[in-house]
Amino acid sequence: MTFEEYNSLSEEEKNAVFSAMDEKGILYDDMEAERNSFKNENEKLRAEMAELKTEMKKTKELNFTLARSVKTEPEKSAEDILHEMFN
């Protein structure tokens, strides 16, 4: 809308144009706030995911370390176990 077109409008139409501009501004502000909210939530979730991946990697390393340190004995047969129980 050019300035001449705006000047040719009646007072009611001019007020309607300003109120429409205010509504668009409010809508823009609301959408910007929602976008920022999603962005912050996404960054938080990404950080949590990275932390969980790091923790899972450390847990797996610990599991392998513990598995190597567990003393394993050769499996005994049922007869050997019964023999140990009664002798």
Image (tube, grey):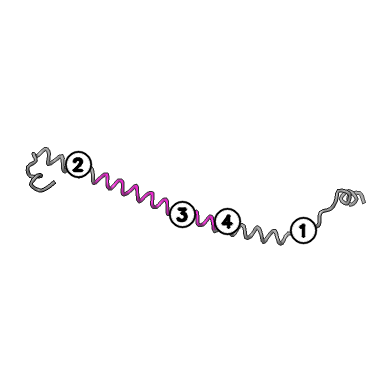
**Above-or-below relation of 63 to 2:** below
Q: Which mark is residue 20?
A: 2
* Residue matched to label 1: 72
Q: Residues within 10 Å of mark 3 (few under 14, many from 20)?
A: few
* Residue matched to label 3: 46
Task: Give whichever of discs 1 and 4 has the lower sequence position.
Answer: 4
Q: Are marks 3 and 2 in contact (CB under 8 Å)?
A: no
Asked if the stretch drawn in magenta spans residue 49, the answer is: yes
Residue 5 lies, in percent from the top left, at 9, 44
Q: Residues within 10 Å of mark 4 (few under 14, many from 20)?
A: few
Segment colored magenta: 25-53
The residue depicted at 68 percent of the width and 59 percent of the height is 66
Task: Give whichever of discs 4 and 3 has the lower sequence position.
Answer: 3
Residue 3 lies, in percent from the top left, at 9, 48
Q: Does dot 4 land on a helix, a strand or a loop?
A: helix
Q: Main secondary structure of the magenta part?
A: helix
Task: Give whichever of discs 2 and 1 has the lower sequence position.
Answer: 2
The alpha-carbon separation of the residues under discs 4 and 3 comes to 15 Å
Q: Residues within 10 Å of mark 2 (few under 14, many from 20)?
A: few
Q: Does dot 1 land on a helix, a strand or a loop?
A: loop
